[in-house]
Image (cartoon, rainbow, N blue to C red):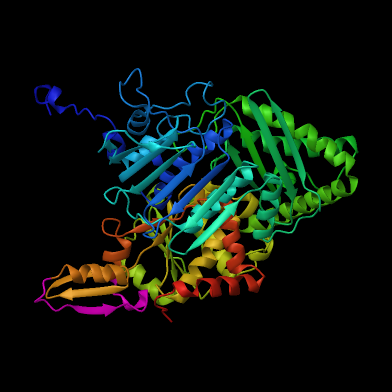
């Protein structure tokens, strides 16, 4: 395009909330289920801000019968309805239809707030097909309705009313979201989390479809929260008494609790002004540093020396289950979704509260301290043992990398990892078909023999006794466990390609458990994927279409002319597909669909794997019995 072809007419100016609708992922992180629920969290966060300001004691959330619309209500001050001096519109309309409009930009209305960007309510409005706001204040009830971010009615004074608060009804827009049905359990858990973080705040959740009502009020705050997570995660603590520390200094409040458990991982659940920071941040860094320094100082003061082993910070924090909650007036979040705190001063602030308190706690509880030190020594020795075992399967140099690879691996010719991808398939039959249909330059195939070892609750050195696991580790080249090094990964994508039946799902779950427990960085770095082979082949004349599942099949059939009779075939496994079919539907990057494996909550993921594959069979029985009514068609 020449300069003459590029004029002012080519510059598009988006007014109001148009940019939110065009680029929703910039504001809510995506248009998937997670982004859908983020709409609700923005409204709920505003209610919590009223609580933090000292004006709200109760919040209620109602999921209506359709499952795709919600009402959030609080008994705060109510959004002002008078004319805003700058916009010359009602303040209610200004707040809900204008980006960067809110009461959180100075400390007069809100000393501590989670919704500091001033875009939450207006973003929810922009991405909703309809919204209605009802405000109770100054002796009256006021309402206004909206459609996709634009007001459809003026602010109306409805009637006299004694009381105060705000009620927001909204319905997410089907034009924006891939799915508009909320998950009631996700809402329930989120609201209960808030009740724990904000001790004394009452939250009520009503699910009209299930005819259930849940009330949450936890005066003991995060101390009770820690006990709940400990119990649900089936983690055994090595000491009875939990450590807790708190300090409030001016505009900053810090609360922390922790226990050492027998688990082999470290879990810290952090919050800023009541908002979950999934990606951590400076406050978590301060917490982790404080734990390591406090234990090291305790061991130095008491002259505790361990022969034959070097204690690393990861050994000290192994098995730690902690909750950290901070409140401050000027949080600097990374992005609108507020998943990471960037305030540099919070690292030292948190460490300054937790470290001395933890040292004192260890010194005044010698029995607990002995148990903690013993736990750390065991972690260090296990790390050394796994290091010795892992060296046997460590990735070789590029010049000799193929000499140590499993014989059953059909490797690719590409030597640049960024160009290569590995398909892990079920059985030799599917492996053979995939081998014929792949692009041998960039695609490698590793067939597994049967179901791999259940690695839940097993040490790294133990799992390496399994030949299938050892082959997998050798193929990836990263090492395993504490000595996993993603820089040595031989493939840019690792793709699980299993049959769409119960055995295939079981194998996928076993593999996901292994990666989550022993190679988690593959997941957090978006290297792990699930292939989506079709379940049905639909042929109409010479036209061939593939359906992922029953719903997709029905969608295709509904779009066919009434006079055309399709031939429908169902694949019982990947081995039944021809090499060309597998290539077209599952292998070829131009036509395939991949699902990236992601972790929304480490705690929830840990709980799920523990329930599904842990030693306690009663948990699996409970899940089967409670969810049996959700199964429409059992494929056996």
Whole-percent x, y for residue 456 in the image: 63, 64
> Does residue 410 sit above or below 632 in this rendering?
above
In the rendered image, which quarter contains the C terminus?
A: bottom left
> Does residue 564 sit above or below 299 in this rendering?
below
In the rendered image, which quarter contains the N terminus?
A: top left
Is residue 267 toward the left or the right of residue 445 in the image?
A: right
Is residue 590 toward the left or the right of residue 43 in the image?
A: left
Is residue 44 toward the left or the right of residue 382 in the image?
A: left
Task: Find the magenta span and give its range.
Answer: 561-579
> Does residue 215 sit above or below 136 in this rendering?
below
Whole-percent x, y for residue 290 in the image: 72, 35
Whole-percent x, y for residue 379 in the image: 75, 52
In the image, residue 206 lies in the stretch drawn in magenta:
no
In depth, the one of 400 and 388 nearer the eye is 388
In depth, the one of 124 and 164 nearer the eye is 164
The residue positioned 48% from the left and 63% from the top of the image is: 211
- Residue 609 position by quadrant: bottom right
- Residue 28 position by quadrant: top left
Question: How many numbered marks are there?
Answer: 0
């Amino acid at each position: 395009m020449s300069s003459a072809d590029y004029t002012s007419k080519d510059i598009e100016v988006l007014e109001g909330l148009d940019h939110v609708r065009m680029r929703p992922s910039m504001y809510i992180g995506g248009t998937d289920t997670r982004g859908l629920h983020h709409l609700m969290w923005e409204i709920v966060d505003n209610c919590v801000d009223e609580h933090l300001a000292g004006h709200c004691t109760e919040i209620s959330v109602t999921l209506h019968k359709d499952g795709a619309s919600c009402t959030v209500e609080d008994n705060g001050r109510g959004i002002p309805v008078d004319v805003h001096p700058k916009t010359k519109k009602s303040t209610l309309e200004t707040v809900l239809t204008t980006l960067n409009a809110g009461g959180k930009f100075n400390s007069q209305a809100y000393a501590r707030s989670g919704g500091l960007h001033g875009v939450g309510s207006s973003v929810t409005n922009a991405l909703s097909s309809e919204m209605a706001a009802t405000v109770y204040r100054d002796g009256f009830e006021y309402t206004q309705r909206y459609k996709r971010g634009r007001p459809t009615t003026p602010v109306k004074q409805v009637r006299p009313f004694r009381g105060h608060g705000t009620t927001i009804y909204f319905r997410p827009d089907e034009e924006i979201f891939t799915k508009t049905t909320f998950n009631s359990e996700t809402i329930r858990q989120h609201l209960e989390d808030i009740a724990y973080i904000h001790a004394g705040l009452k939250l009520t959740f009503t699910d009209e479809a299930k005819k259930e009502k849940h009330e949450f009020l936890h005066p003991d705050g995060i101390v009770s929260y820690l006990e709940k997570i400990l119990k649900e995660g089936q983690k055994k603590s090595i000491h009875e008494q939990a450590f807790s520390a708190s300090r409030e200094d001016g505009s900053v409040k810090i609360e922390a609790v922790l226990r050492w458990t027998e688990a082999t991982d470290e879990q810290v659940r952090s919050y800023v002004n009541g908002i979950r920071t999934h990606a951590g941040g400076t406050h978590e860094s301060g917490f982790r540093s404080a734990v390591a320094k406090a234990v090291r100082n305790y061991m130095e003061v008491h002259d505790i020396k361990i022969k034959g082993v070097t204690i690393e910070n990861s050994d000290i924090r192994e098995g730690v289950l902690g909750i950290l909650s901070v409140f401050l007036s000027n949080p600097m979040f990374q992005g609108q979704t507020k998943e990471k705190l960037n305030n540099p001063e919070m690292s030292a602030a948190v460490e300054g509260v937790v470290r001395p308190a933890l040292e004192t706690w260890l010194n005044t509880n010698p029995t607990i301290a002995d148990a903690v030190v013993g736990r750390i020594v065991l972690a260090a020795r296990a790390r050394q043992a796994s290091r010795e075992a892992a060296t046997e399967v460590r990735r070789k140099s590029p010049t000799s990398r193929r000499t140590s690879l499993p014989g059953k691996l059909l490797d690719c010719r590409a030597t640049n990892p960024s160009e290569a991808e590995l398909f892990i398939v079920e059985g030799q039959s599917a492996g053979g078909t995939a081998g014929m249909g792949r692009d041998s330059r960039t695609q490698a195939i590793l067939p597994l023999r049967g179901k791999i070892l259940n690695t839940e609750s097993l040490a790294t050195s133990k799992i390496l006794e399994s030949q299938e696991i050892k082959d997998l580790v050798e193929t990836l080249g990263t090492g395993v466990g504490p000595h996993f090094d993603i820089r040595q990964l031989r493939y840019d994508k690792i793709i699980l390609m299993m049959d769409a039946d119960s055995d295939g799902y079981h194998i996928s779950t076993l593999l996901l458990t292994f990666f989550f427990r022993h190679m988690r960085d593959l997941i957090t770095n978006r290297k792990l994927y699930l292939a989506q082979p079709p379940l049905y082949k639909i042929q109409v004349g010479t036209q061939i279409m593939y359906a992922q599942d029953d719903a997709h099949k029905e969608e295709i059939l509904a779009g066919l002319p009434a006079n055309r009779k399709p031939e429908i075939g169902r694949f019982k496994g990947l081995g039944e597909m021809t090499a060309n079919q597998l290539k077209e539907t599952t292998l070829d990057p131009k036509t395939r669909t991949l699902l990236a494996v992601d972790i929304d909550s480490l705690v929830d993921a840990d709980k799920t794997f523990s329930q599904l594959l842990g030693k306690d069979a009663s948990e699996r029985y409970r899940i089967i019995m409670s969810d049996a009514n959700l199964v429409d068609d059992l494929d056996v």
